Amino acid sequence: AAARDRYIKKTKTVCTYCGVGCSFEVWTKDRHILKVEPGPGPANGISTCVKGKFGWDYVNAGDRLITPLIREGDRFREASWDEALDLIAWRLNEIKAQHGPDALAMIASSKCTNEEAFLVQKIARQVIGTNNVDNCSRYCQSPATMGLFRTVGHGGDSGTIADLEASDLIIGIGTNTAESHPVIAARIKRAQKLRGTKIVVFDLREHELARRADTFLRPRPGTDFVWLTAFSKYILDHDLADWAFLRERVNGLEAYRESIAAYTMEYAAEETGIAQAALEKLAREVAASPGVSICWAMGVTQQCGGSETSTAIANLLLVTGNFGKPGCGAYPLRGHNNVQGASDMGAMPDRVTGYQKVDDPVAVERYRREWGVTLRPERGLDNTQMVDAALKGQLKALWLTGEEMSLTDSDSNHVEASYERLEFFVVQDLYFTNTARFADVVLPGSPSLEKEGTFTNTERRIQRLYQAMPPLRGTKPDWEIYQAVAQRMGAQWNYAHPSEIMDEIARLTPIFAGVNYERLGGFGSLVWPVDADGTDMPLLYRERFNFPDGKARLYPAVYQPRVQAPNHEFDLHLNSGRMLEHFHEGNMTFRVPGVAAQSPDAFVELSPELAAERRVQSGQYVRVISASGAIRLRAVVTGRVSGNELYIPMNSRSAEDAVNRLTGQNKDTVTNTPAYKDTRVRLEVLPET
Ligand code: SF4
């Protein structure tokens, strides 16, 4: 054993998949991954799921990009790093000179490190001079962040995953937690078993957590706002609110009560399709529970009213005094490993690091002193606006890292058409993706095992990852790529190690003031906000909400009913989401043979009643058609879905049959997050072949 151990390297890392942020020791010999040993991680203890334990072979996939590629006509040719980096710097400077800085845009990757997301927005703001920068939280959690900004002030979970376990009642809304955030689901189930925590699930689909829930309710699509707001009204009207909390810690009660006057339980029952008695019983339970936590995800946020419903969640928690103590609060569950971090790092069109607004004079002065430039005060383009601007010929150049945007943004055909209009498109990724087909330059980046940096998980926990193996020959860590281009564009960057980037982040960002690599050593972690002396704050709002007067705000949100209710042409509602074995479109997990074999391809779920009506058998091919496109899949007949609902996982081996060929261009009215869940379709049964 001793001889064996001499050749085995054990490296602490953080999971590269979902936002739980499980940490591990990965055992390697050269580039071979021998074993992944969970914990002792602050987020996961010694737990893991199948992806964290067995999902790492994508790192050694045979089709990793190992050299930059440059387009020549319809083909790509291999190029040296110098040639590719020179070309990018020259073209970006040239387009900026011809069309101005706002003709360029950058998209940071939520799979990359905090330090890399920071450099992406630094290139945009310091080197190019534009606020056209975003990250993939635009596709998932921006509405949740907006709901929290409006009401409690910080754009993150209000407590830790351990705090969640101390809840008396956990409500999951539009979250398939057992498949999307498995280790959090394991903790919820443990709380149910060991301390009698009640679980309530509101969802369209009877997924695993719904089956285990004490109460499972299926509201009509897009109507969560109504029952949430009716609960608040019922609790206030029946004198069940936490009046002391409201009096001492919350502003805006009067205006809020006026704004919700129409949200009676009768109306909620009519709109959601759930019996009034069941809603009233649950509202009383919410009011009576000492600690209520609400977890939500894309079933809430990917709707036209995603921000409004997220606001309604926070309003209900305020009315019932469920902030500032363990076992209660708001838990928007982040999808990517570092989607929280990419937003924290200012890869957003209106905010720099730590959610400081680009027109905040204090932040502007802080950045001017550090970077020598004055931040532009106007909001830049977000991801979805970039697509529209490219189609109109206003956006000329885009640099996209680590995102299969053509298949994860809504309405893939529309997105691909926008790429065709770009004058210059850089894609940086591990593989030659579907999106890369449209690029002018493709750069090979590095996965997390090949570099150093930090990730921030869903509970705001910042953790270090260490380099388990050197970058694959021919590739570079993404932060080195950004630095090399910035230098070629004339910037004086000279980072020798990602820790120096974190030191700069700390100088620029009050909520990261005390973050440094020393304090994050080994399995150590810090949960932001972190004071200069290193004191962190796992539980937010104990004494103050994040507003100047320290008080929360009940925010009069506005119901946005769905716009794609089924009609005679498209008579079914389409829902989509994750599967346990796959991550997003599947570019990484389909390259892990053992994991991919568990779920080799996408399918469409039909309810037994719909299958009987349309004469569809499990295994039969069907075509699903929307106003945006059509895809062909195998049918799975299952009681997980009901009535005229279809469900399609978001992963697909075939770019042509990806679910986002069907989704359209409706968006959350506040954040522009695509309303993926507001899609109507029809079904054609295909003859057996
Ligand atoms: Fe943990 Fe999520 Fe990774 Fe699974 S995918 S090991 S739950 S971080």
Image: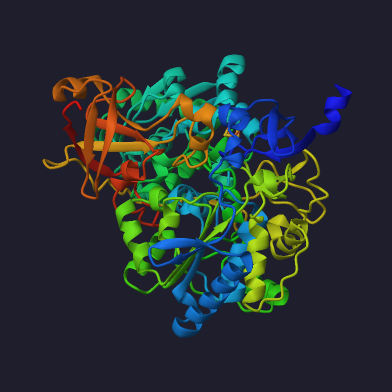
Task: Estimate the x, y position of residue 190 in percent, counting from the top left.
Answer: 59, 19
Is 113 placed left or right of 657 in the picture? Answer: right
Residue furthest to the right in view is: 2
Quarter holding residue 677: top left
- From this view, report whether residue 281 is shown above or below residue 246: above
Task: Estimate the x, y position of residue 619 in percent, counting from the top left.
Answer: 28, 22
- From this view, report whether residue 475 is shown above or below residue 178: below
Quarter holding residue 81: bottom right
Q: Quadrant of ligand 1?
A: top right
**Nearest to the observer: residue 285 or residue 515:** 515
**Nearest to the observer: residue 679 or residue 116:** 116
- From this view, report whether residue 286 is shown above or below residue 349: above
**Nearest to the observer: residue 449 or residue 312:** 449
Is 637 placed left or right of 337 in the picture? Answer: left
Q: Residue at x 63, y 74 (%)?
A: 364
Q: Residue at x 69, y 72 (%)?
A: 366
Task: Estimate the x, y position of residue 543 in percent, counting from the top left.
Answer: 67, 46
Residue 678 in view in this figure: yes
Residue furthest to the bottom in view is: 98
